[in-house]
Amino acid sequence: MIRYLLAICFLGLVICTSCVPQKDIIYLQDKGNTNDTIPSVVEQQKPYRVQINDILNIRIKVLDQDNATIFNPTGEGSLEASSQERAYFDGFTVDLRGNIRIPQLGDFDVLNLTLEEIEVLVNNRLLEKEFNEFAQIFVTVKLAGLRYTTLGEINNTGSQVIFQERATILEAIANAGDIPIEGNRKEVRILRQYPHGQEIHRLDLTNIDVMKSPYYYIQPNDVIIVDPLVQKSLGTGTNGLQTFTAILGVVTVVTSTILLIDRL
């Protein structure tokens, strides 16, 4: 009888700990406030500063656009190339020294500059070397998409691109197919590149306070890493049906073992 009781207690413990709790899979939970108001981001995000390996899309417009053709490379890649490949071929990649090279204008040191600062830099060089103030120069500099990498327990791993100016960590994860139930939403890691090196930041996506984090918005070349929950490592199941199946198998083995022992 004692053996039966021990077996039942063991199975009960496994059942209680095997399923993934609902609170571990719901995003942006209000864990401290007494109302349902979502806290807003009071401080505006700081302008992004260009890093090594960024790809810049630079377009120059003047009164006589034929004179600016050499500055606006297009179609250098294959006609069947994707938008990502075209951005790579047509854009200006920041090299390991933090420079980009524009035809006729030479090298520009753009490391740690904002996009607006690069626009001014290019505009001044054009006035200095190619055009006068009557050319009505208009320069636009944008990132050729927000490029980042996803690893670990996420539906689509590898290189990802979002073609917009800003994106949150939630948008980035949604773009990569979301985190499955087996993924740990409470400790998502972001490997971020800085001029002094790389740093790792951790975010709890189940807590609504993540919206206040300075890392809530992703940056180009971020690496987003999602670890698996312990339930996946144990193999006990992540929902009721999987758990029932696993427990049924354990019960069958335990019952068979006890019956064999009793017959000895």
Image (cartoon, grey):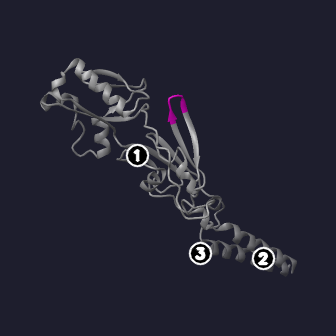
* Magenta span dominant secondary structure: strand
| Label 1 packing within 10 angstroms: few (<14), some (14-19), many (20+) | some
Q: Is residue 6 above or below residue 182?
A: below
SS at mark 3 in the image:
helix
* Residue drawn at point x = 70 percent, y = 67 percent: 17
Q: Amino acid at mark 2?
A: Ile
Q: Quadrant of residue 92?
A: top left
What is the CA distance from the residue labelled 2 to the residue labelled 3? Answer: 19 Å
Q: Nearer the viewer, residue 114 or 108?
A: 114
Vertical position of residue 25 compared to residue 173: above or below: below
Contact, mark 1 vs mark 3 (Cβ under 8 Å):
no
Identify the residue at horizontal 36%, vertical 34% (top origin).
115
> Distance from label 2 to label 1 (Cα)?
53 Å
The mark total stands at 3
Q: Are marks 2 and 3 in contact (CB under 8 Å)?
A: no
Q: Earlier in the sequence, mark 1 or mark 3?
A: 1
Instruction: Find the residue positioned furthest to the top.
Output: 129
Give the amino acid at mark 3: Leu
Dot 3 surroundings within 10 Å: few (below 14), some, or many (20 or more)?
few
Residue 141 picture location, percent across and down: 31, 35
The foreground one among 217 and 2 is 217
Q: Which residue is mark 3?
A: 241
Q: Circle 1 is placed at which residue position?
A: 166
In what element is the residue under mark 2? Answer: helix
- Seen from the viewer's position, the closer of residues 38 and 27 is 38
CA–CA distance in space, label 1 to label 3: 40 Å
Q: Which of the two labelled residues, at mark 2 and mark 3, occupies the earlier sequence position?
A: 2
**Magenta-drawn segment:** 193-197
Residue 65 percent across, percent down from the top left? 14, 32
Amino acid at the residue labelled 1: Arg
Q: Which residue is tagged 2?
A: 8
